[in-house]
Image (tube, coloured by chain):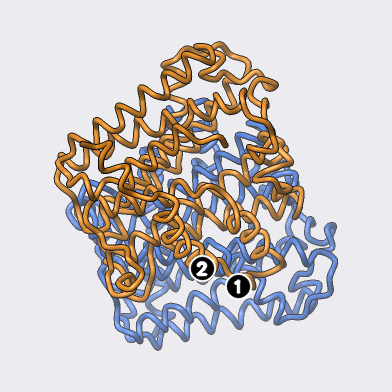
Chain colours: A orange, B blue
Amino acid sequence: MSGQFSNALDLADWSQRRLAQVEQTLRQGIDAHAPAGLGQAMRYAVLDGGKRLRPLLVLAAAEAVGVDLEAAVISAHPSAVAAFRAACAIELVHAYSLVHDDMPCMDNDVLRRGKPTVHVKFGQAQALLAGDALQALAFEFLTPQDGSTDLQVQAVQVGLLARAAGYQGMAGGQAIDLASVGLPLNEAQLRQMHGMKTGALLLCSVRMGAVCNGKPPAQVTSSLAAFAQALGLAFQVVDDVLDVTADSATLGKTAGKDAAAKKPTYVSLMGLQAAQAFADKLYQEALAALAGSGLNPTSTQALRALARQVVQRDK
Amino acid sequence: MSGQFSNALDLADWSQRRLAQVEQTLRQGIDAHAPAGLGQAMRYAVLDGGKRLRPLLVLAAAEAVGVDLEAAVISAHPSAVAAFRAACAIELVHAYSLVHDDMPCMDNDVLRRGKPTVHVKFGQAQALLAGDALQALAFEFLTPQDGSTDLQVQAVQVGLLARAAGYQGMAGGQAIDLASVGLPLNEAQLRQMHGMKTGALLLCSVRMGAVCNGKPPAQVTSSLAAFAQALGLAFQVVDDVLDVTADSATLGKTAGKDAAAKKPTYVSLMGLQAAQAFADKLYQEALAALAGSGLNPTSTQALRALARQVVQRDK
């Protein structure tokens, strides 16, 4: 069943139409006139780049629970507005984390999405502030003050995003990552680290999308969470594989960096071939979780197509 | 009238009882077991230090609009829980900003509240992450998921805090501050910079307290905002005065630093005596705003006492 439906969706077309709206919302919401160059640094960090996987997951999850995202109805439907705002918010958190992660005291990376990193272009102080301001802006996006979204949905989405971004999620995972360079982590430890560092935001993307209409049934919530967790882990395994098999030009960032830094990866832990097989297994788990959600297979086809893209991507 | 009532309140006693609850809530909410030392760095940055002016302003504003903060009733009243959570949240944002502000790429300060700064104690990477995680935690504090506060109040408070912390507020003010070292700012420019860098969070403190019960009357909202804006500016003027007149041991941070860094200050702009007179004038403006709020003078006595403390402090 699921294969039949996933073939029906043109993911490139689906993504393009939704991302046009996401980009426009981001562009309008990141004030170029923010003082003393801060706005330029923030825009540089966010606009015109990235795969936008997290926003697409938010929107696909919103569609899965019945939110109508067609352009003509967005402005009139609080749930559609909430979905697009959440899509932007999660990308802002992702973008801020990259800005800070690239700084000299962290990964000290000079190339991101094929461009100089923010601190290389604007200086470390401005990069630090831009990251801080982007995190705050994410919560601004979730709390429009014009009555365009439901206040209860706002509060629930903020609760999800704050917990996914903080010490129990992304920031906590980064702390483990920093502390584990050169250490022989086992698979459980590696899974915990990535589950927090990368998985938490991917899970949050799906969760924020799923609450745009209000609280979904428990079976839907738990199935979507299982989908997102399998997908999040697959994403990281594929990242580790690509760090070995792809070149910097394709990736848009420095390849082979994990190995050079002696960071533990799924490839270093289980070997290249087994890591690739593991990613495929996780993809199947993600599809199985969706199939057991009770949701209409037509409504979940974008989620399925995104999962396939995560596993089959080459950058 | 206002003098009579402000004398009736023992501010030290009032503050001590409320701060005991704030400290307990912060201590419970900043998980010492957060991974890889992150929890220790976060606790070090927040606990056992600081004047806690912002939390006290939140709580005083909440009392001004009728929220009952006596210990016996806190747990049963969503508005009291919302006030204490907002008090903690604003302190978390303030604490994160100090952690990042002290880093080598910003002010490069090694002493804060009489202790080594976070990056000196835990390293720059951990300081960066701890600051990031503290900002996220602020929004967690505002969005408890146990039904203890009203979801609409949560959303409104998040909206206020995100805007006060971000590019239109604190982060924007810091960007202007960085860009203006050594430049001859005039009073209007200095006022804008401090209004964003410091004033926005002080104003937000009062605003978050004032919405714990729901939206207050327009006259109350505007009067409290005028009070907070005068107070915020007075706070900065007194800070500039103390940077000249106090020593490092009393301040718990490096004195004379602004002059050494050639940062524009109210003292460098108008002279010491005129700056002191300006602070007094702003204090009177703050009291006048409260007197015109229509609020019962008894309910605003903590706000008046805090304003007096801001102007009369010696550190």
Q: Secondary structure at mark 1?
A: helix
Q: Mark number for residue A29?
A: 2
Residue A207: tell me if it is visible: no
The local crowd at label 1, few if under 14, some if 14 to 19, many if 20 or more residues have their Cα within 10 Å, is: many
Quadrant of residue A281 within the rendered picture: top left
Residue name at image x 77 percent, y 80 percent: B186
Q: Is residue B140 above or below residue A67?
A: above
Residue nearest the viewer, comparing A167 with A148: A148
Q: Position of residue A251 (x, y in %)?
A: 63, 37
Q: Mark number for residue B195?
A: 1
Report the number of discs: 2
Q: Quadrant of the N terminus of chain B?
A: bottom left
Q: Mark number for residue A73?
A: none
Amino acid type, mark 2: Gly
Q: State if disc 2 and disc 1 touch (CB < 8 Å).
A: no
Q: Position of residue B35 (x, y in %)?
A: 47, 27
